[in-house]
Amino acid sequence: MTIYYLLTNGSFTYAFIAPLVVTLLVGVAEETMFRRILFIRLLGLFQERGFKKALLISAVCFSLLHAVNILGGSPVPQVLMQLAATFVAGLFYVLMFDYTRNIHFLIIMHFLWDYILFSGATKQIPGYTVLMGILQAAEIVIMLVLLFRKWRKYDAAESI
């Protein structure tokens, strides 16, 4: 059940609240683990020149965490698609964290993304597929802009 259910039935039920709590906890845990702890530690390990390594290792680890869905019975092609999507999301979240140094923003984004995916909203929101495609395209554009800015900063530092 989703916000759609709440709006049409007007009640807070377990089916409405449980996905909210679970996806919020997942957002807090994963963002803390992969951005606040792993990425920061990797940056310290590789120093500032190792940003690319820290970025890639953090995104790969975030992606591989989701391979556990095979054990939950998800079909292999679906898990492979999820691994690709979470790798891109991992790159995006690291770049956003590096740019903003604000984990709270990422937790909210992660929570909202997971809630939309796991709450059943996908079946109830008209045009959901188009909306998610637009959001993913926006993530990729923002990620490319941030990467370009970061690389340009490194190139300028090397020429000095």
Image: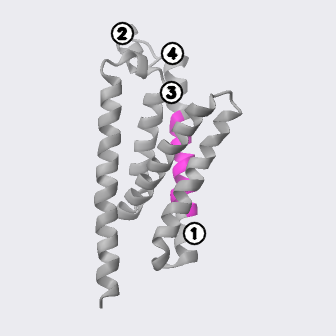
From the viewer's perspective, is the residue at label 2 or at label 1 nearer? 1
Q: Which residues are magenta?
A: 23-38
Real-space Cα separation, disc 3 to disc 2, in angstroms: 19 Å
Colouring used for the render: one colour
Label 1 or label 4, whichever comes before in sequence order: 4
Earlier-in-chain disc, 4 versus 3 = 4
Total count of labels? 4
Q: Secondary structure at mark 2?
A: helix
Marks 3 and 2 in Cβ contact (< 8 Å): no
Q: Position of residue 24 (x, y in %)?
A: 50, 38
Cα separation, mark 1 vs mark 4, equals: 41 Å
Q: Are marks 2 and 1 in contact (CB under 8 Å)?
A: no
Q: Main secondary structure of the magenta part?
A: helix
Crowd band around label 1 with a 10 angstrom C-alpha radius: few (<14), some (14–19), many (20+): some
What amino acid type is highlighted by mark number 2?
Answer: Thr
| Residue 24 forms part of the magenta stretch | yes
| SS of the residue under disc 4 | loop
- Pointer 3: what residue? 118
Residue 8 disc label: 2
Where is residue 80, by image quadrant?
A: top right
Q: Residue under circle 1? A: 41
Quadrant containing the C terminus is bottom left
Nearer-the-camera pick, 158 or 109: 158
CA neighbours of label 4 inside 10 A, class few (<14), some (14 to 19), many (20+) = few
Task: Specify the label residue 13 is tagged with.
Answer: 4
Q: Along the polypeptide, which appears first: circle 2 or circle 1?
A: 2
